[in-house]
Image (cartoon, grey):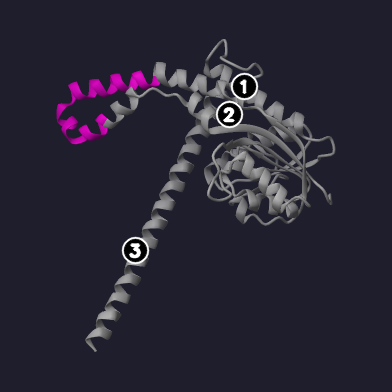
Amino acid sequence: MLVLVSTYGTIINNIWLSQVLIICTRSISELVMKLKDFRLDVEALFAQSVYGHGHLHYGYWKDEGTPSVASIEKLGEAQINYFNKLVETIPDDVATILDVGSGTGSNAASLIDKGYSVDCVCPSTSLNKIAAKKLPEESTIFECEFEEFRANKTYDALIFAESFHYLHADIVLEKGIECSKKYILIFDYFRKRDSENYQRISYSQFLKLLNESFSDSYEILYDEDVTNHILPTFLVIDKISNDYFKPFLVTAASRFKKEHPVYNLLFGFFISKITRFANKKNNRYKTFAANNEYRLILLSKKNKN
């Protein structure tokens, strides 16, 4: 009897511990998603207020190498170049588009201005509110993850402008069979190191997935490595951060310590962390190039609807 009671108690404890772990895991996942959404919201606000266009993607620089002028204004121009490069790749027989990961709706609105009919998929309520103000009533914004998207119609093309890496590539290609009549256009970066699953995959993994699982469904019409045209974005960001933003943080933290010694006792740990962060130079230019490659890929369905 004692053995049974002990065993029963162990089982109950294990079930309780499992539930605690599940709750903690869900809480952490929800926090990560909220932080991601918050970051995107801040970027959207910055792009909308500073650039005036609301594009969230990296810029495309026509000239490779170090830009002659590293400024926010030039970065805004590079983001317009990015959109133009995207449009140049859209085949002539495309009329309807599903913009997956539509963000603030800037790409969708610009595509509509060029005569395309565009619907959007984006899980962010705040970004969708911004997008809704730019788009006509006939454009539908589906507020959900693309993995959960259920199409009530098909589109000539699905566009993933810097949203593909967030998604599971196998699900994207599977849904493309259902949602796309003709094409999938991917303008995004791939990691150089293989992923453990089909999310944030490497370029070689992507090609392997296409060849092994979707060779009867798709063929590659266009594939360009544009990494060197994207990298100047990070030179600009690194320069602004290292030359202006981080020195400002160091000065502000130093003044706070001197002028508010009592508060410094309470928040000294956080102030020290901010100072350490600010004293560390950004070098995203090198780390991005070492770990990623940026590609523009156009897939065509073999059996077009």
Pointer 2: what residue? Answer: 58
Secondary element type, mark 2:
loop
Identity of the residue drawn at 52% across and 29% down: 290
Numbered tag placed on residue 20 in the rendering:
3
The percent coordinates of residue 111 (x first, y second) are 72, 34
Label 1–label 2 contact, CB within 8 A: yes
Q: Residues within 10 Å of mark 3 (few under 14, many from 20)?
A: few
Identity of the residue drawn at 65% across and 16% down: 63
**First of labels 1, 2 by sequence position:** 2
Residue type at the position of mark 3: Val
Is residue 90 left or right of 54 when viewed as pictured?
Answer: right
Q: Estimate the spatial distance between the alpha carbons at disc 3 and disc 1, rounded to whole Å.
A: 48 Å
Q: Residues within 10 Å of mark 1 (few under 14, many from 20)?
A: many
Residue type at the position of mark 1: Ala
Residue 71 at least partly seen: yes
Is residue 118 left or right of 33 when viewed as pictured?
Answer: right
Q: What is the span of residues highlighted in magenta in the rendered image?
A: 245-272
The percent coordinates of residue 100 (x first, y second) are 65, 44
Identity of the residue drawn at 73% across and 51% down: 214
Pointer 1: what residue? Answer: 78
| Main SS class of the magenta portion in the image | helix
Q: Residues within 10 Å of mark 2 (few under 14, many from 20)?
A: many
Secondary element type, mark 1:
helix
- 244 or 223, which lies in front? 223
Secondary element type, mark 3:
helix
Residue type at the position of mark 2: Tyr
